[in-house]
Amino acid sequence: MPVDPHDSRTDSLGKTFDSFAPLSARRLLLLGGIGLILMGMIFGDVFAVFVLHQNAARVGANLAAAAHAALARDARAVTANFQNVGSFLENRGTKVDTHVHMIGFGYLALMLAIVQPWIALPEITKRRLAWMFLFGAGLLPVCVFLIHYVGLDYSPLSTIGWASILADLGGLFVIVATVGYFAGFWKYFRNAERMSVQDDLTVIQETSGRALLAGGLLLILLGFLHGAYYAAADLYKHEDLDYDILVQMSSGAATGDTAAVDAALADYGQLQGEKAVNIAAHAHSIEFGILAMLLAFFQPYVSLHETWKLRWTGVLLCGSVLLPVCVLLELKYGLIAGGLADIGGLLVIVALLAMWAGILRYTGGLDAAAGGAP
Amino acid sequence: MSGARRLLLFGGIALALWGMSYGLWYAVFSEHQALNGIGASLTAGFVGSAERNSVSAASALSRYREAKYIYDRQVDVHSHWIGLAMVLIVLGIGFDRVGFSKRWRFLLALALFLGAGLFPLGVLLQTLSHGPAPRAIAIAGSALVIASLAGCTIGFARNPASSRE
C-alpha cells in the first residue's frame, strides 16, 4: 500500500499533527501494544503446551497423596502435600496472570493509541504517559511471573514479597498513565470551542477491516452467550459439586474408605477440567473478538498487499474460532483437541505477527520518506 | 463525536480505571490473605479427617467453601469490569457505523454501559449476601450486555457504510 509521508490529521488542539511520527504517543502505544499482546500470547501458548497439563497432574497427584495420608492418619503428610498443592497452584496462577495481564495491557494500549487525537494534551506529555504506560505494562507481568520464584525473601511484609510489591507498582504506573489520558480526553470535551478531530483511522473502508470488525463482534457475542449459558446452567452446580466432592473425600478418609476417596479424587479431577475448559473458551472467544475489532481500525497502517491482508485476516479469525471450540472439545477428545487448540493460538500469533510486520514496514516507509524530504 | 460514542468511550475508560484500581486494591490488601485462608482451611479439613475429628473437618471445609466462593467472585469482578470496559471502548470507537437512528444508538450505548457496570457489581454483591437480589442484578446486567451486543451486531450489519465525525 502507498505510504503517505505527510500522515497528518487535525488533532484536539485544532492543529495539524503528524499522527504517526517517530516516537509519537500513537506509534509507541500501537507498536508497544501489539508487542505486549504477541509476547503474552507466545507465553500463553508455551505455558499451555509445556506447563499447564503437567502442573495439573502434579496438583492432582499431591491432592491424592494428601487424601491417602488422611486415610493413613498421617496429619503431617497431609499438611506437607497441601503445601505442595499450594505451591503448584501459585505457580500456575502467576503464569496465567502474566499471560492475561500482558495481553490486557496490550489491548488497552491499542485503544489508547486510537483515541490519541481526542486527548487534549501536548504531544510531549502524551509521549511521556505512553512510556509510563508501557513501562508499567511490562513491569507488572514480569514481576507477577517472578512471584513464585522470589517468594517472601527479604520482604518487609509478612504476606507480600518484593515481586508482588513491584508488580503492584507496575499496575499503579498503568493506572496513572490512563488517568492522565482520561484527563486529556475530559479536557477536550469540556472545551466549548473545541475543534472537530479528523482521523481516518476510525473510518473502516478496507475489506479486511470490515471482516475483522464483523468477525470480532460475533466472537465477542458468542463468548458472552457461552458465558451466560455456563453461569446459568453449570456455575452454581459446579461450585456445589466442588464442595460435595471434597466432603466425600474427607469423610471417606475419616472412615477409612479407600474406594470412596479414590472415586472422589477422580470426580474432582473431572470437575476441575470441566470448569477450566468452560472458563478458557469464554475468555479466549471474547479476547480474540476484541483483538480482531482493534486490528480492524489499524488496517490502514498495515503495509501489505490487500490480498495478503485478507489472508492474514482469515488466518486470525480461523485461529480465533479454532482455539475456544477445541478447548471446549478437550474433555471429550483429549489431547487431539488440546493440540488443535494450541494450533489455533499459534495461527492467531502468526497472523498478528504478520500484521505487526506490516505496520513496521509502514513506519519504515514513512520515516524514510520524511527523512528524504527537504 | 456523537453522544453514544462519547458515553461508550468515557464510560469505558472510566470503567477500566475503576476495574484496575479495584484490582490493585485487591492485590495489595486482600488476595494473598484470601489465598492463605483457602489453603489453610482445606488443609485443616483433611488434617481433621486424619485425626478422625469429623466436626473439625466439616467446619474447616465449610470455611473453605465460603472463602473460595468469595475469592472466585472477587477475581471475576476485576476481570469482567476491565473486559467489559475494553468492549465499551472498542465499540465506542466504531459506534457511528451502527445503522440505527441517533436515539436508538444512544439507548444501545446506555444499555451496554449500564450492563457493564451492573453485571460485575451484582457478582461482587454476592460476596456480601447469598440472597436473590445480587444474583438478579448480575443477571439483569448480563442480559443488558448481551441484548445490546446483539443490537450492535445487527446495527453493524445494517449499515456497513463508514461515517466521519
Image (spheres, rainbow, N blue to C red):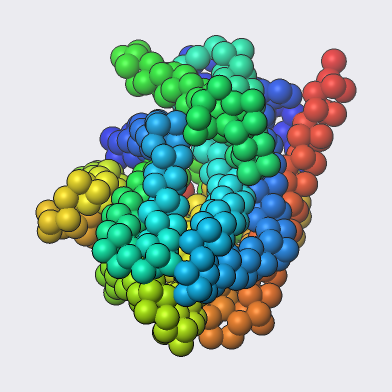
From this view, report whether residue A240 is shown above or below residue A51: below
Q: Say whether residue B29 is left or right of residue A169.
A: left
- In the rendered view of the protein, which quadrant contains the N terminus of chain B? top left
Q: Position of residue B123 (x, y in %)?
A: 27, 51
Q: Nearer the viewer, residue B67 or A354?
A: B67
Residue A23 sits above or below residue A58 on the image: above
Instruction: Tell me, yes or no, if residue B82 can be seen here.
Output: no
Quadrant of residue B68 in the image?
bottom left
Residue pictured at 56% horizontal, 70% vertical: A65
Vertical comparison of A233 with B96: above or below: below
Tell me: B99 left or right of A338. left
Name above or below for residue B74 compared with residue A363. below
**At 75% across and 53% down in the image, what residue appears?**
A354
Q: Position of residue B99 (x, y in %)?
A: 33, 54
Please tell me which residue lies in front, A40 or A124. A40
In this view, the residue in front, B20 or A179, is B20
Residue A266 can be seen in this image: yes
Number of marks: 0
Q: Residue at x 77, y 31 (%)?
A: A366
Residue at 30% x, 55% y: name it: B63
Image quadrant in which the C terminus of chain B is located: top left
Name the residue at the right extreme. Answer: A372
Residue A273 appears at what percent x and percent y?
50, 73
